[in-house]
Image (spheres, rainbow, N blue to C red):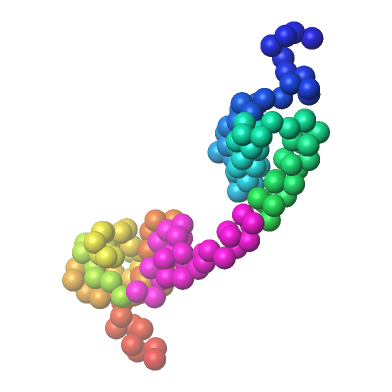
């Protein structure tokens, strides 16, 4: 075996730090949040071995124990972070997040296609013909196109 290749009897703190860095790279490449907890365990163990040298079998047991504790605590912490709410519910929903909103037509809807103002931006809209300046309600979306219905039509339905 080459001299530069560490054996189990010669594991040094920097080996744990390299393992931690490798696990962080895996975290970036893999979906979810898992490898980061193992990486934190490896970094912590590297620091502990740097301060307090110990035999390799104990290092491996500590790594296993630290990893389990880190995963459990990390999952507990992540599960306590609220994902829903006003901001979280609209994340990655595209134009669907505008459903139910009343908006203003900026470019007349002619032959079923026009533009509407939603917040501070214009969106492509489809629906019944409506003149510029009229109020319409978003009833759905298809990709980045909102589907609208004139408010006057909705009031007649109520």
The image quarter containing residue 43 is top right
Q: Position of residue 50 (x, y in %)?
A: 62, 31
Residue 72 visible in the displayed image: yes
Q: Position of residue 155 (x, y in %)?
A: 33, 88
The image quarter containing residue 133 is bottom left
Indicate whether 5 appears above or below 95: above
Give yes or no for residue 87 being in the magenta stretch.
yes
Q: Answer left or right for 39 relative to 158.
A: right
Q: What secondary structure do most residues of the magenta stretch adopt?
A: helix
Q: Range of the magenta residues?
A: 73-101
Q: Position of residue 20 (x, y in %)?
A: 61, 34
Which quarter of the rendered picture does the N terminus lie within?
top right
The image quarter containing residue 87 is bottom left
Which quarter of the rendered picture does the C terminus lie within?
bottom left
Indicate whether 19 appears above or below 82: above
Q: Answer left or right for 69 relative to 133.
A: right
Indicate whether 59 appears above or below 65: above
**Residue at the limit of the structure toward the front, as seen here:** 52
Residue located 30% across and 59% down the image: 123
Of residues 134 and 48, the one drawn nearer to the viewer in this rendering: 48
Residue located 73% across and 32% down the image: 54
What is the tally of numbered marks visible in this picture? 0
Q: Position of residue 10 (x, y in %)?
A: 74, 21
Q: Answer left or right for 36 relative to 119.
A: right
Indicate whether 15 appears above or below 59: above
Residue located 26% across and 59% down the image: 122
Give yes or no for residue 109 being in the magenta stretch.
no
Of residues 43 and 100, the one drawn nearer to the viewer in this rendering: 43
Q: Answer left or right for 41 relative to 82.
A: right
Of residues 3 and 81, the one drawn nearer to the viewer in this rendering: 3
């Amino acid at each position: 075996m080459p001299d530069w290749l560490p054996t189990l009897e010669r594991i040094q703190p920097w080996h744990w730090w390299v393992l931690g860095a490798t696990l962080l790279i895996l975290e970036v490449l893999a979906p979810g949040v898992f490898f980061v907890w193992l990486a934190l365990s490896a970094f912590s163990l590297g620091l502990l071995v740097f301060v307090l040298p110990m035999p390799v079998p104990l290092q491996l047991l500590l790594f296993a124990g630290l990893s389990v504790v880190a995963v459990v605590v990390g999952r507990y912490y992540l599960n306590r972070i609220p994902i829903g709410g006003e901001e979280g519910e609209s994340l990655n929903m595209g134009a669907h997040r505008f459903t139910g909103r009343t908006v203003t037509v900026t470019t007349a809807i002619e032959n079923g296609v026009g533009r509407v103002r939603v917040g501070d931006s214009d969106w492509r809209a489809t629906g019944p013909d409506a003149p510029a300046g009229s109020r319409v309600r978003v009833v759905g979306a298809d990709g980045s196109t909102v589907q609208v219905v004139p408010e006057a039509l909705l009031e007649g339905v109520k």
